[in-house]
C-alpha cells in the first residue's frame, strides 16, 4: 500500500550556494498504480528565531516568538493530477537558488534560538479519502567566494597567560592554587572549514590537573519588540588534556568546528550569531578556571 | 588317481661330483672398477649443461658416461661411516626437531615469562627482531602481542563500564540536565552512555575480563553488519575509554593489546566499507565497480568522500581526549579517501595531541599505537616516529614524579615492575625509529637519553632496538653507562642481560672482549637473587664461549656453580642452567679442552634432578657425536668423562622408560663406544669394551654394538698377523671370542642373539678358534626354536618365517666349512640343524620347511664334493679332513635320502590338501636338484625325477613355457657330459600340453 516519496538531490553533500541550481529527482515508489491530484514542490529558506525563557517570561517565550524571516521561497508543480504507474517513478526538478528581493542568503545554521534552514518539500495531493503525502529534504547553503562584505580569515594570534592574578570573579584569592598556563590561539578569525589551532603550556601548577578542555560557545542575539535577548550556550566541549598534564610541554589546541552547528559569524539587524571559545582547566578537586576568547568564524 | 604313478616316498640318494670350481668361474661376471659405494646417495654436481651420470644401475656404464671436463663431486662428507647406520646415529630427525625447538616461539616466550614472572624483558626476541626486521617491522607487532598477553597478567579484580553488555549491576549515570537543547544532546550522544543502560561490571577476573572484551568485539562486528554503524562506533569509543583507566596497572599492556585489536577491526571495517561502497568507474568502463586496492584520492567518488568526511567530523566531536585519539588513529587509513598527502600531517598532529595525556603510561601506549598505525599505512615519512620518542623523553621525568609513586604505592606495585610495563610500547617505538637507522641516530638518541636521570629503562630500550652491531661497537661505553646507572627503578640485571644479548649477536672489538666481561661480571656477580644472576649468566656464558678462551669459560662455570649452589638455588633454575650448558656446548669447537675443564663435570653435578641431568647428558653426547663424526679418541680423561656421562644416561633407563627414549640413549652410547679407539693397543681396547659391558648392562643395542666391536677387533687382529697367530694373538682372539660368547646371552632380543651368534661363530672360525665357533653355532641352533612366530617390522606384524628361512640358509653355508669336531660324530652340527628344522613348528600352509630342505640338499651335495667351493684360510674343512672318504660320502647320501623323503612327504601332503600350484613348483624344484646334483645313472633316482616331472605337470599348474625352459636348462647343464644317461633322461621329459587334461 505504502507509497514512498523520496527527494534525492543531485549533489551528495547537499551543499549549494547562491546562484546555483538545486536539482534532483522526486522518487516515487509504489506497489500499485494510484491516482493523485497533483504533485507540487516547494523550496524555502527561513530564519527561525525563538526567545529564551530566561530573558522574557515563559509565556511570552511561548507565544511571542518572533515571526520567521523567509529568505527564499519558490514552488513548482511537478505533475498535473493524473496517475502514477506502479514501480519506481523519478520526476526530475530544478530550482534556481536566488534570495527573495531585499533579502540575502545566510548559511545554514542549527542553533538553539536561531535556526537557519533550507528545505525542499514535496506534496502529493490525493483525493479526500486518502491522506496527502509529503516529504521534505533539507539542503545546506554555504557562501560562495566573491560575495562582497565577506570577511576572510587571517592570522591574528592571541597570546594568553592564565594565572591566579589574571582571574576575575573569585571570592578568596588565597584559596586559589598557584599555577601558570601560557599559550596562544593561532588566530581570532577562523575559517570554519579548518580547525581551531593553537598551543597551551602548563608552565607550573601546584595541584594536579584533572582535565584541560576547549569549549565552543555560541552567542545568539535576537532583536524583538521588547529589546533584544542574548544567550550563550555550549556547542561542544573537547578535551585536550587528560589527567595530570606534563608541565613545560606544549599541548596542541585543536578543534574541528562541527558542521551545521556552526556558521560564519552572522550579524544582521534582527539577530546575531557569534562564537566564543573557552579554555577550561579543571583541577583535581573539581575547581575550574575558564578563560574566554571571542572568535570570529568565516567561510573562507 | 588312476593312470598317474604316485611318486615313491623314498629313494637312495647318490651324490654326483661336479666340477664346481670351474662352474663358479664361468658364472662370474666381468669385473669392473667402481668409484663409489652403491648405497651412498647419488649426488651429482654439474658444471655443464650436459647431464653426467656418475653411477647407473650396476655401475656398468660408468666409464662410458664419464666426461673429462665436468667433475662430479659426491658429497659424502655429510654422511657418517655407515650409510645405513646414519639414520640410527644420534637421534632420528623427528626427535631431533622436537629437541631443538622444545617449544614453539609463543610458548617459549610464555615459558620465559614463567621463569621470570616479574620482569618484562623480551630481550631475546627483541634483539633478533631488530636484526631481521627489514620488512617485518609491520608484522612484528602480531608476534609481540601474544608475548605481551602472556607476560602482563594479574590476579587483581578488574571492572568494565559499558552499555553494550548484559549482566553486571546498573549504575546511575548523572541524570542529564533537563535541557531543552536537543542539539547539545545530539552532539554529545556519541560519547554519553545511553540512559540507564550503563552497567558496571566489578570484580572480574582477568579471564572474565578478556571474555567480556571478546564479547564487545563480536558485538561490534555484529552491529556493523546489521547496519548499526553508530552503535559500532559507540562500542569502539567505549572500548578506547577503558584505556584511560590504569587501575590495575600490571594488566595495562594486555588490556592495550586486547582493545587495540578491536580498534583495528573497527578501522578495517570502516575502510573496507568505504572502499567497496564507492562506485568507481574504471577508465573506459560504464559499469561501476568498487575501488581497486591501490586507489588514489582522485579516483574516489564524491559520495564516498562525503561519507568519509562524516566519519572524521563525527570522531572530531568525541568529547574525551583518549577515545578521540584512539578512534581517529583506528580509522586513520581512511584519510586516503580524502587526500593522499594527509598522512604525515595527521600523524604529526596526533603525535602532538598525545602530549595532552597526563598519565605517561597511557601516553606511551597511545604513541605505540600511533606508530603501529603509521607503519601500517604506506607512508615513506618516518619523522613522526622519532618525534614520538622525543616527546616521550620530554615527559620522562614524569615517570618518577611523586603522584605516580603515590599511585603505585596505593596499587602495591614497585617501581621496577612499573617500569617494565613500558618496555613493550617503548621497544616498539624505538625499534621503528631504529629500523634502518644510522649510527648517527643512535649517537643522537643516546646523547639525549644520557641527560635524563634514571635512564636505565631508556638504555635497555636502546640496546634492544638498535642493530647489535652498533651496540657492540660501543660496548665499553655501554658498560660504563650501565655501571653508573643508579639502582633506582629499572632492574639492573635486565640491562646487562640485554647488553649480553646484543654482544652475542654482534662482536665487540676483540681487544675489549675480556675487559667487557670483567667489568660486567664485577656487577653481576654481586647480584644476590639467583634468578637475576642466572638470567644474566645464561646470556653472558654464550658471550664468553664465543669470544673468549676455554680458561675464561671454565672460570665462568665456576662462578655459576658458586652462585647457584648456595641454598640449593639451582633447583629452581634448571631450565636456565640447561641453556648455559647448551650454549657452552654449541660454541665448544674443541671437545677435549671442554671435557678437561675442571668445572665442567662439577657443573653437571649441579643438575640434581635426574630427568634434567639425563637431558643435559644427552645434549652433551649429541654435540659430541656431531663434532666428532669421524674422529676417534683414546684420551683417558675424555673417555672417563664421557663414560661417566653415558653411565648417567644409562642408569636412567628403567622399566618405565619409553621405547624411544631407550633407543635414543642406546644410540648415543653406541656412538660413544664406536668412537673410542686405542689404535694398535688391542688389549686396552678390549678392556675398555669389558668396562663398557659392565657399565651398560640394560640396553640391548649397546651389547650388540659391543659384540660387533669386539668381533671387529678380532678380525683386525687377524688382519695384522695375516692369519698366522702367535701365541699371544691367539690367546687374545680367544679372549675376544669368549667375550662375545659371554655377552650375547644378556641380550633379550632373540633375533639379535641369533645374528650375533652366527657372526661370532664365523669370526671365531676365521681366527681358528674352532671350539668357540662350535659353541657359538651350537648356541645359535638351540635358539632357533625360540624365535617368535610373529615379528614386528616397521610397526607391522609379520610372520618370522622368511627371516628364519634366510637365516638357516646363511647358517648352512657357514656349516659347510666348519670342520667336524673330533669328539662329535660326522656332521654333528648339520644333524643338529636338521633336528631343529624337523622339530620347528612350521606353518603347514607354506613351503618354508621344504625350501629349507632343498637348501640342505644343496649344502649336502656341496659337502660331498672332493674340494669345497670356498674355504677359510688356515682352517681345514671337512673335504680335507675326510678326503672324500666313502664312509663320509655314504653318510652324506643317507642324510640326503632322509631329506628327500621329508620333501616327498610334504609333496604328498600338498597333494592331499589340493595345493596343486605349490605342489607343482616344489616338485619342479626337487626335480632340478635331483637332476643336477644326484647321480642319474642310478635308475631309482632317474625314475623319481621323472615321476616328479609328471607330478609337476599333473594338474596343469605348470606353465608350458617354464617346462620348456627347464628342459632347455637341463640340456645345457648336461651338455658338458657325454653320458647317455643324461640324454636319455632329457628325452623322457615330455611336456604335456594343457589340452590333454
Image (cartoon, coloured by chain):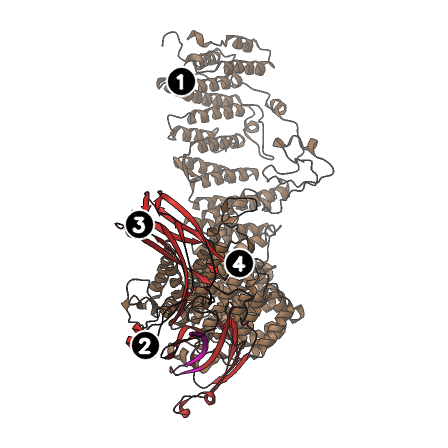
Secondary element at image label 2: loop
- Residue for badge 2: A53
Chain letter behind tag 1: B
- In the image, which is nearer the foreground, mark 1 or mark 3? 3
Residue A94, x across and y down, in percent: 46, 53
Instruction: Tell me the tag on residue B257.
Output: none
Cβ atoms at labels 1 and 2 below 8 Å apart: no
- In the image, which is nearer the foreground, mark 1 or mark 2? 2
- Residue for badge 1: B916
Residue B117 in sight here = no
Q: Distance between the residues labelled 1 and 2?
A: 121 Å
Q: Residue furthest right?
A: B69
Residue A300, x across and y down, in percent: 54, 68
Residue B837, x across and y down, in percent: 42, 29
As drawn, the chain in brown is B
Q: Are marks 1 and 4 on the same chain?
A: yes
Amino acid at each position: 500500500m505504502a507509497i514512498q516519496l523520496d527527494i534525492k538531490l543531485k549533489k551528495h553533500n547537499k551543499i549549494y550556494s547562491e546562484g546555483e541550481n538545486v536539482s534532483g529527482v522526486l522518487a516515487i515508489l509504489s506497489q500499485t498504480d494510484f491516482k493523485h491530484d497533483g504533485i507540487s514542490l516547494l523550496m524555502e529558506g527561513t530564519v527561525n528565531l525563538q526567545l529564551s525563557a530566561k530573558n522574557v517570561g515563559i509565556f511570552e517565550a511561548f507565544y511571542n516568538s518572533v515571526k520567521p524571516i523567509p529568505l527564499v521561497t519558490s514552488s513548482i508543480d511537478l505533475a498535473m493530477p493524473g496517475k502514477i504507474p506502479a514501480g519506481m517513478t523519478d520526476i526530475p526538478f530544478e530550482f534556481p537558488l536566488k534570495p527573495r528581493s531585499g533579502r540575502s542568503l545566510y548559511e545554514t545554521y542549527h542553533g538553539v534560538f536561531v535556526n537557519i534552514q533550507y528545505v525542499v518539500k514535496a506534496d502529493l495531493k490525493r483525493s479526500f479519502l486518502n491522506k496527502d503525502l509529503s516529504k521534505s529534504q533539507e539542503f545546506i547553503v554555504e557562501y560562495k567566494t566573491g560575495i562582497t562584505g565577506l570577511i576572510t580569515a587571517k592570522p591574528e594570534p592571541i597570546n594568553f597567560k592564565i594565572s591566579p592574578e589574571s582571574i576575575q570573579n573569585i571570592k578568596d584569592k588565597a584559596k586559589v592554587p598557584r599555577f601558570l598556563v601560557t599559550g596562544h590561539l593561532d588566530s581570532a578569525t577562523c575559517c570554519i572549514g579548518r580547525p581551531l589551532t593553537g598551543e597551551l603550556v602548563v608552565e607550573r601548577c601546584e595541584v594536579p590537573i584533572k582535565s584541560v578542555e576547549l569549549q565552543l560557545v555560541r552567542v545568539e542575539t535576537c532583536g524583538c519588540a521588547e529589546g533584544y535577548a542574548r544567550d550563550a550556550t555550549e556547542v561542544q566541549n573537547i578535551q585536550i588534556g587528560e589527567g595530570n598534564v606534563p608541565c613545560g610541554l606544549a599541548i596542541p589546541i585543536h578543534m574541528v568546528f562541527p558542521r551545521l552547528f556552526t556558521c560564519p559569524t552572522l550579524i544582521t539587524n534582527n539577530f546575531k550569531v557569534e562564537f566564543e571559545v573557552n579554555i577550561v582547566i579543571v583541577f583535581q578537586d573539581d575547581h575550574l578556571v575558564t578563560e574566554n576568547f571571542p572568535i570570529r568564524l568565516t567561510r573562507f | 588317481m588312476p593312470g598317474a604313478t604316485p611318486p615313491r616316498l623314498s629313494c637312495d640318494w647318490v651324490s654326483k661330483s661336479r666340477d664346481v670350481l670351474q662352474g663358479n668361474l664361468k658364472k662370474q661376471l666381468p669385473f669392473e672398477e667402481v668409484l663409489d659405494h652403491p648405497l651412498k646417495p647419488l649426488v651429482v654436481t654439474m658444471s655443464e649443461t650436459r647431464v653426467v651420470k656418475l653411477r647407473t644401475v650396476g655401475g656398468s656404464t660408468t666409464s662410458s658416461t664419464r666426461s673429462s671436463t665436468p667433475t662430479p663431486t659426491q658429497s659424502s662428507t655429510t654422511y657418517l661411516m655407515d650409510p645405513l647406520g646414519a639414520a640410527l646415529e644420534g637421534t632420528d630427525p623427528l626427535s631431533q626437531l622436537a629437541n631443538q625447538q622444545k617449544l614453539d616461539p609463543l610458548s617459549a616466550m610464555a615459558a620465559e615469562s614463567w621463569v621470570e614472572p616479574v620482569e618484562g624483558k623480551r630481550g631475546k626476541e627483541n634483539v633478533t627482531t631488530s636484526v631481521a626486521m627489514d620488512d617485518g617491522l609491520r608484522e612484528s607487532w602480531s608476534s609481540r602481542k601474544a608475548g605481551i598477553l602472556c607476560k602482563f597478567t594479574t590476579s587483581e579484580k578488574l571492572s568494565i563500564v559499558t552499555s553494550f553488555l548484559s549482566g553486571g549491576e546498573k549504575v546511575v549515570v548523572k541524570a542529564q540536565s533537563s535541557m531543552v537543547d536537543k542539539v547539545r544532546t545530539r552532539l554529545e550522544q556519541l560519547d554519553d552512555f545511553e540512559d540507564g543502560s550503563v552497567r558496571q561490571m566489578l570484580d572480574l577476573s582477568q579471564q572474565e575480563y578478556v571474555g567480556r572484551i571478546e564479547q564487545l568485539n563480536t558485538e561490534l562486528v555484529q552491529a556493523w553488519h546489521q547496519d548499526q554503524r553508530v552503535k559500532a562506533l559507540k562500542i569502539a569509543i567505549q572500548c578506547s575509554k577503558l584505556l584511560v583507566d590504569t587501575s590495575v596497572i600490571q594488566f595495562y599492556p594486555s588490556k592495550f593489546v586486547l582493545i587495540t585489536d578491536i580498534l583495528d577491526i573497527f578501522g578495517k571495517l570502516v575502510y573496507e566499507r568505504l572502499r567497496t561502497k564507492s562506485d568507481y568507474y574504471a577508465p573506459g568502463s560504464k559499469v561501476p565497480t568498487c575501488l581497486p586496492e591501490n586507489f588514489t584520492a582522485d579516483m574516489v567518488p564524491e559520495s564516498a568522500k562525503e561519507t568519509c568526511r562524516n566519519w572524521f567530523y563525527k570522531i572530531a566531536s568525541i568529547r574525551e581526549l583518549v577515545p578521540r585519539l584512539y578512534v581517529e588513529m583506528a580509522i586513520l587509513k581512511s584519510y586516503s579517501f580524502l587526500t593522499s598527502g594527509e598522512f604525515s600531517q595527521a600523524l604529526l598532529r596526533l603525535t602532538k595531541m598525545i602530549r595532552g595525556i597526563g598519565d605517561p603510561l597511557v601516553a606511551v601506549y597511545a604513541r605505540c599505537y600511533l606508530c603501529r598505525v603509521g607503519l601500517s599505512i604506506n607512508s615513506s615519512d618516518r619523522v613522526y616516529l622519532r618525534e614520538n620518542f622525543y616527546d616521550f623523553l620530554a615527559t620522562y621525568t614524569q615517570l618518577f614524579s611523586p603522584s605516580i609513586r603515590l599511585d603505585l604505592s596505593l596499587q602495591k606495585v614497585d617501581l621496577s615492575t612499573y617500569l617494565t610495563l613500558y618496555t613493550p610500547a617503548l621497544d616498539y617505538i624505538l625499534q621503528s625509529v631504529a629500523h634502518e637507522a644510522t649510527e648517527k641516530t643512535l649517537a643522537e638518541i643516546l646523547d639525549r637519553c644520557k641527560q635524563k636521570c634514571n635512564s636505565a629503562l631508556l638504555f635497555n630500550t636502546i640496546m634492544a632496538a638498535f642493530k647489535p652491531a652498533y651496540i657492540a661497537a660501543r660496548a665499553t661505553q655501554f658498560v660504563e653507562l650501565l655501571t653508573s646507572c643508579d639502582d633506582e627503578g629499572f632492574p639492573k640485571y635486565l640491562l646487562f642481560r640485554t647488553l649480553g644479548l646484543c654482544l652475542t649477536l654482534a662482536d665487540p672489538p676483540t681487544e675489549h672482549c675480556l675487559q667487557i666481561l670483567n667489568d660486567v661480571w664485577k656487577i653481576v656477580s654481586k647480584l644476590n637473587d639467583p634468578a637475576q644472576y642466572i638470567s644474566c649468566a645464561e646470556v653472558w656464558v654464550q658471550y664468553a664461549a664465543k669470544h673468549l678462551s676455554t680458561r675464561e669459560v671454565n672460570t665462568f662455570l665456576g662462578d655459576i656453580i658458586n652462585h647457584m649452589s648456595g641454598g640449593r638455588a639451582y633447583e629452581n633454575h634448571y631450565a636456565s642452567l640447561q641453556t648455559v650448558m647448551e650454549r657452552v656446548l654449541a660454541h665448544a669447537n674443541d671437545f677435549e679442552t671442554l671435557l678437561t675443564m675442571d668445572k665442567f663435570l662439577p657443573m653437571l653435578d649441579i643438575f640434581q634432578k635426574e630427568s634434567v641431568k639425563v637431558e643435559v647428558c644427552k645434549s652433551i653426547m649429541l654435540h659430541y657425536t656431531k663434532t666428532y663424526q669421524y674422529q676417534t679418541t683414546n684420551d683417558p680423561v675424555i673417555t672417563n668423562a664421557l663414560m661417566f656421562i653415558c653411565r648417567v644416561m644409562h642408569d636412567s633407563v628403567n622399566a618405565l622408560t619409553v621405547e624411544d627414549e631407550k633407543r635414543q640413549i642406546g644410540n648415543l652410547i653406541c656412538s660413544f663406544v664406536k668412537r673410542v679407539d686405542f689404535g694398535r693397543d688391542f688389549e686396552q681396547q678390549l678392556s675398555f669394551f669389558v668396562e663398557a659391558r659392565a657399565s651398560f648392562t640394560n640396553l640391548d643395542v649397546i651389547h650388540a654394538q659391543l659384540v660387533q666391536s669386539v668381533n671387529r677387533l678380532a678380525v683386525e687382529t687377524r688382519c695384522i698377523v695375516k692369519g698366522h697367530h702367535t701365541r699371544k694373538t691367539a690367546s687374545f682372539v680367544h679372549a675376544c671370542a669368549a667375550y662375545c660368547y659371554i655377552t650375547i646371552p644378556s641380550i633379550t632380543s632373540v633375533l639379535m642373539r641369533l645374528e650375533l651368534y652366527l657372526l661370532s661363530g664365523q669370526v671365531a672360525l676365521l681366527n681358528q678358534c674352532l671350539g668357540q665357533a662350535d659353541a657359538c653355532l651350537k648356541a645359535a641352533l638351540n635358539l632357533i626354536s625360540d624365535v617368535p612366530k610373529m615379528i614386528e617390522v616397521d610397526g607391522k606384524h609379520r610372520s618370522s618365517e622368511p627371516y628364519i628361512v634366510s637365516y638357516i640358509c646363511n647358517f648352512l653355508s657357514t656349516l659347510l666349512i666348519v670342520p667336524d669336531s673330533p669328539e662329535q660324530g660326522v656332521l654333528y652340527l648339520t644333524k643338529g640343524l636338521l633336528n631343529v628344522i624337523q622339530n620347528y613348528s612350521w606353518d603347514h600352509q607354506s613351503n618354508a620347511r621344504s625350501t629349507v630342505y632343498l637348501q640342505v640338499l644343496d649344502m649336502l651335495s656341496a659337502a660331498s664334493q672332493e674340494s669345497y667351493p670356498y674355504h677359510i684360510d688356515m682352517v681345514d674343512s671337512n673335504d680335507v679332513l675326510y678326503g672324500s672318504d666313502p664312509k663320509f660320502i655314504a653318510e652324506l647320501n643317507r642324510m640326503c635320502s632322509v631329506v628327500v623323503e621329508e620333501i616327498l612327504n610334504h609333496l604328498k601332503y600338498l597333494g592331499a590338501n589340493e595345493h596343486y600350484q605349490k605342489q607343482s613348483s616344489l616338485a619342479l624344484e626337487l626335480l632340478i636338484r635331483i637332476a643336477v646334483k644326484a647321480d642319474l645313472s642310478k635308475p631309482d633316482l632317474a625314475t623319481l625325477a621323472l615321476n616328479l616331472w609328471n607330478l609337476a605337470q599333473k594338474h596343469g599348474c605348470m606353465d608350458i613355457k617354464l617346462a620348456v625352459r627347464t628342459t632347455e636348462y637341463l640340456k645345457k647343464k648336461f651338455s658338458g657330459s657325454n653320458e647317455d644317461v643324461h640324454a636319455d633322461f632329457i628325452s623322457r621329459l615330455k611336456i604335456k600340453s594343457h589340452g590333454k587334461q
